[in-house]
Structure formats: structure tokens, C-alpha cells
Image (spheres, helix red, strand yellow):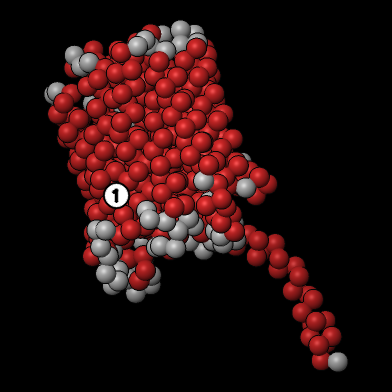
Amino acid sequence: MSTPNTAHKAAPQAPLKPSAQKSNSMFNQPIAVWAIAFASIIAFMGLGLVDPILPMMKDQLHASDSQLTLLFTSYNAVMAVAMLITGVISSRLGIKRMLLAGIVLIAVFSALAGSAGDVMEIVWLRAGWGLGNAFFVATALSAIVSLSRVGVGKSIILFEVAVGLGISVGPLLGGELGAISWRSPFYGVAGLMVLAFCLILFMMPKAAKSPAAVTPIKKKVSLLDPFRALKHRALLIFGISAALYNFGFFTLLVYAALVLGHLHHVDVHGLGYVFLGWGLLLAFTSVVTAPKLQKRYGTVKSMCVQLLLFAVTLFVMGYWTTEKSVIIAMVILAGAFLGNNNTLITTAVMNAAPVERPTASAAYSFLRFIGGALAPYYAVKFAEWFDFHAPFYIGGGFVVLAVIVIWLNRKHLKHVDEAEAH
């Protein structure tokens, strides 16, 4: 008799369900998470900030296309290597100090780049910028997950939204400020990073309130941890495939901007708006469609389809390189496929191996940014060695190769769909 009575008394609590659903919303976050997300947006502006001003820098600094691509190569190469040491440093500094250190480095090197007088000087300064970005990116996701009120999966989606917005706003900021001077976008990022520094400093909780997100990690962390993590086949496969498809990603990001600027004479404003459309579509699909694809079709199958569709956009750009409208349309459309894939693979990596998430992220990011470092430079070289269509075809080929790697190893990856984060 007692059980029915208890059930009867519990029934009036049913109207609380909508409130519970609201509390589990991705957007129901403490202010510290929003501060980190805002800082992430600014940090990822650096990825596409330079795109609209490449033609202007070429003319005013008398730089070659190969020199311009080194702005991305140095940035990504340093990020790749630095990812291997972020775990050791953050274990001693704690996540909050690590984030602040990354922000300071980005602000300083961005401001110095704006004051430089030679393109190769900016290349080296972009390397310092990449170091700051590595410090920030390697810890931002961990901080959001540890401070979030919702699960890992939704926290990752929120982070990907911030990444997508940063990537999309970067070209817009570069285009609008670049209309004043090619130096202005660099100063703009430095100023925004000062604001981000203040937000993190004052809005992230003190150690007593959230020790995991602020204080140094007591567990001993080794420089070899990311390499040990890559012994897990699933994490290694995701890292290799990311390096391959990033070759296509940065071919799109850098070489397409050069084609639009040089071949089709799209001005700095126009380039900013093209890549704004690309980034907005990337951000939208990251949060809206990627989780639905994963739930309905599974991670591996969804990733393969999205990457094949991205490869098709590169092949189309390779065939119709001389058609401005086709290049613009394909650049924007590619954002949808990349947004879906970014969320799918980031969530999968967090559950690919039985290692701590910062270690998994560092190992994966090391491989991923190697592809981002090689692609811009060799895209221009392919154009010199063959013709101006070739970089798009070769970039698409690398993306297809990424699909082959994933599909041949799919039996080692299926466990990611069973993880709690999904």
C-alpha cells in the first residue's frame, strides 16, 4: 500500500519537467563558460583573419604567394608542436593561468605583427601567435567541459559553435578593418584579446569554487603522454584522417582566397563576406545538423559522407576555377560539410581512447595541425608545378584519402557511438 501512495504523491511533480529540460539546455551555462566561449571566438579569428588581406599584403609588402602561405604554415606548425607540451605546462599552471597565458601571447604577437614592415617578419610573429593559440585551444575545451552544467556532448557542441563563429567573424573583421589598412586587423585582434583577458580573469571561478578548472593538476604529466595516447588505434586513425582532410580545408581557406583575389579581383570587403558566409554555415551545421546526423546514421558513416561531399566541392572548384560565381558558391557550401564533420570528429576524439581528454586532444591536434601547416605552402607550389586548377584537385584527393583511412578502420571506431558524450 505504501508504494502506490508514494507514487500518487510524486505525480504533481510532473510539471517540473520543462524546467528540467531547460536546465539541460546547451545554453544554460555559468557566466565563466560564456567568458571562455567568447575568448574562443576571438582566438579562432586568427585562422581566417588574414584571408581577405592577402592580396593587399602581396601588393604593399611585395610578397610572393609562397611567402603569404607561410603566414598559415608557421601558425599551424607551431600549434602542432606546442600541443605536445600543453599538458605538461597546464598541469603546473592550471587551466585558468594557461588560458590567460595563451591570450597574452596572442595579443602581444598580433600587435607586433601589425607593426611589422616585412612579410617574413610577420611569418615569425604568426608563429608566436600560434603558440598562444595552442595554449588557449588545448585548455579551452577542457575548461568548458569542467565548468559546464550540461554533458560532455553539449559542451563540445558549444565549443564548436564558438570555433565556427570565430572562423566566420575573422574574415569579416579582416575585410572591414583591412579596408583601412592591412595592419588594422592585427591591432583589432590584439584589442579584443585584452577584453577576453579581463573576462577570463574576473569571471572564471577561484580555486575554492572549482579546483579542477583553476588549480594545477597534481597528477604527474609527461611529455610522452600524447605519443602514448596515439598507441590507441582509434585516436591515431582520427588524427591521421584529420591531417589529411585539413589539407583540403586549408587549400580552401588559403588558395581559394588567393584565386578570388588575384584571378577574379574580389576586393577585401568581398573576400570578407564570402568567408563570413562560409563560417556562418559552418557554425550553424556544427550545432544544428551534426548531432542529428550522428544520432541517425552514426559517427563514422556521417563523417565519411560529409568528407566526400567536401571533396566534391573542391573538385568542382578545380574544374571551374575560372568561374567566380562557382568558386564563391562552393566556398560557402563547403562550410556546411566542414561544420558537420568538425563536431562529429571532435566529439569522437574525446571518446576514442581511455586517456584523459586533454591528452587525447593534444595528440589529435598535433596530427591535425600538421596537415594545416603543409597545405597552404604546397597548394601554391602545386599551382606553380602544374596549373592553377591542380591545388583544388589534389586537396580533394587528400580528403578522399581521409575517407578511405576512416572506412578501412571503421571496426576500430564504432565504440565512439556508445560513449556517454553522445
Q: Quadrant of the C terminus?
A: bottom right
For mark 1, what is the residue?
A: 83
Question: What crowding class fits label 1: few (fewer than 14 Cα within 10 Å), some (14-19), or many (20 or more)?
Answer: many
Residue 269 image-quadrant placement: top left
Q: Quadrant of the N terminus?
A: bottom right
Apparent side of residue 51 relative to residue 27 in the rendered image (left or right): left
The kind of residue tagged 1 is: Met
Residue 325 sits above or below residue 174 on the image: above
**Image location (x, y in percent) of residue 207:** 32, 71
Residue 255 sits above or below residue 302 on the image: above
**Image location (x, y in percent) of residue 92:** 23, 65
Residue placed most toward the observer, 94 or 276: 94
Residue 77 image-quadrant placement: top left
Apparent side of residue 222 relative to residue 328 in the rendered image (left or right): left
**Image location (x, y in percent) of residue 161:** 49, 44
Residue at the extreme bottom of the image, as rendered: 1
Apparent side of residue 189 relative to residue 298 in the rendered image (left or right): left
**Image location (x, y in percent) of residue 73:** 27, 31
Per the image, label 1 sits on a secondary structure element best described as helix
Apparent side of residue 415 relative to residue 96 in the rendered image (left or right): right
Q: Residue at x 66, y 64 (%)?
A: 19
Residue 16 sits above or below residue 252 on the image: below
Q: Residue 14: tell me if it is visible.
A: yes
Q: Residue 260: tell me if it is visible.
A: no
